[in-house]
């Protein structure tokens, strides 16, 4: 069976692990990203957001929407790794080289990123709304992922599941930067020695730090555009350019980087755990597929 499937399974597993470990940071960051008005209930920073969430919602508030996030992480990373490895294998067959060039890494990342955005955007629309909605439903029951999906479709229509798809597609550049940097750094280190788990952790951190720092304004706009849009002209983002213009006009350039500290920490830790766990899980995924293939062969023989 193709290694692409093994990479997809390992990537999905790694995505679940990294998402679960860093999810409280995602909650804090998402709420800071979508916050526009400043009042007594507003978050003044990362630590203030953390303190207020804990005091009003308890520890459970830090894990608002975790169910949809774990599902989204598994699907996102599974799809991404499947297409990335498929394109990578095609390049290696065509060039008869073991390692991809920088341009080939970027093309592989672009194809994988675009496919991942289109397929998984509905999951992240629902997750963003759940992560923020918990704030207003702290005294009652938080809606489930299925209920949130149904609510989005009922109130805003099916196309609302692809809100924020334009900035999301532009953000394909994020994993392109990340995986290109990772692949090139990995290739350089492998010239001198074999990579270990700590190496994958460090290389993942460095590559993600670079990617997130460059693309953060688009990450912020994607989160805001995935929310239910206000009927108020001043608060509604009709397009990516409109969103950029309104954020700068209402909040200044600094508004484009609201919550970047927690995002950088979360992104670096997520990427580090993802790369490290994905590499560790890959061999088990291969063994599982071989076992399943052997069982199918036996079943066919019978």
Image (cartoon, rainbow, N blue to C red):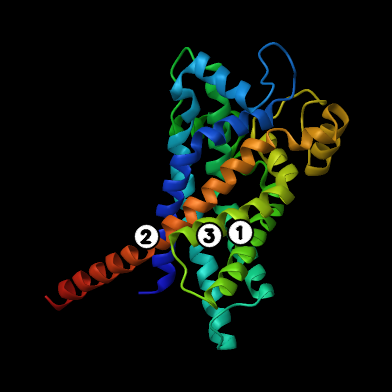
Q: Residue at the location (25% across, 67% down)?
A: 292
Provide residue 261's location: percent of width, then percent of height. 66, 37
Provide residue 89's location: percent of width, then percent of height. 52, 77
Going from the N terminus, do you reach mark 1 or mark 3 first? Answer: 3
Q: In the image as oriented, which residue stretches furthest toward the bottom?
A: 96
Answer with left or right where residue 72 lies relative to residue 168.
Answer: left
Answer with left or right where residue 32 lies relative to residue 237.
Answer: left
Q: Secondary structure at mark 1?
A: helix
- Residue 40, quarter of picture: top right
Residue bearing the label numbered 3: 80
Answer with left or right where residue 115 lies relative to residue 5.
Answer: right
Residue bearing the label numbered 1: 113
Q: Residue at the location (60% across, 53% down)?
A: 117
Answer with left or right where residue 302 lies relative to residue 175.
Answer: left
Q: In the image as oriented, which residue stretches furthest toward the right?
A: 249
Provide residue 56's location: percent of width, then percent of height. 52, 14
Within 10 Å of disc 3 (Cα), the crowding (few <14, some 14-19, many 20+) is many
Q: Are marks 1 and 3 in contact (CB under 8 Å)?
A: yes
Within 10 Å of disc 2 (Cα), the crowding (few <14, some 14-19, many 20+) is some
Q: Is residue 128 above or below residue 176?
A: above
Residue bearing the label numbered 2: 281
Q: Are marks 2 and 3 in contact (CB under 8 Å)?
A: no
Going from the N terminus, do you reach mark 2 or mark 3 first? Answer: 3
Going from the N terminus, do you reach mark 2 or mark 1 first? Answer: 1
Q: Is residue 176 above or below residue 245?
A: below
Q: Is residue 186 above or below residue 122?
A: below
Tag nearer the camera, 2 or 1? 2
**Nearer to me, 288 or 203:** 203
Distance from Cα at disc 2 to Cα at disc 1: 22 Å
Q: Secondary structure at mark 2?
A: helix
Provide residue 98's location: percent of width, then percent of height. 53, 82
């Amino acid at each position: 069976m193709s290694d692409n499937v093994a990479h997809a399974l390992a990537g999905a597993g790694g995505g679940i692990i990294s998402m679960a470990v860093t999810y409280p940071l995602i909650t804090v960051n998402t709420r800071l990203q979508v916050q526009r008005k400043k009042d007594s209930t507003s978050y003044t920073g990362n630590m203030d957001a953390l303190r207020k969430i804990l005091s009003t919602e308890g520890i459970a508030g830090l894990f608002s929407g975790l169910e949809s996030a774990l599902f989204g992480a598994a699907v996102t990373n599974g799809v991404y790794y499947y297409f990335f490895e498929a394109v990578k294998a095609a390049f290696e067959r065509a060039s008869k080289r073991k390692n991809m060039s920088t341009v080939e890494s970027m093309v592989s990342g672009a194809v994988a990123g675009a496919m991942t955005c289109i397929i998984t955007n509905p999951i992240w629309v629902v997750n963003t709304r759940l992560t923020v909605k918990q704030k207003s439903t702290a005294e009652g029951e938080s809606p489930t992922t299925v209920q949130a999906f149904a609510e989005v479709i009922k109130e805003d229509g099916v196309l609302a599941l692809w809100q924020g798809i334009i900035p999301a597609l532009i953000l394909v550049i994020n994993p392109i930067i990340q995986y290109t940097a990772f692949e090139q750094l990995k290739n350089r280190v492998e010239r001198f020695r074999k990579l270990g788990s700590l190496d994958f952790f460090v290389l993942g951190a460095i590559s993600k730090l670079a990617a997130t720092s460059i693309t953060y304004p688009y990450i912020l706009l994607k989160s805001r555009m995935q929310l239910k849009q206000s009927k108020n002209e001043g608060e509604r983002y009709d397009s990516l350019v409109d969103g950029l213009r309104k954020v700068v006009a209402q909040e200044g350039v600094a508004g484009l980087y609201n919550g970047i500290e927690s995002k950088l920490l979360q992104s670096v830790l997520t990427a580090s755990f993802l790369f490290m766990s994905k590499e560790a899980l890959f061999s088990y995924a291969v063994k599982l597929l071989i076992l399943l293939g052997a069982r199918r062969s036996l079943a066919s023989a019978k």
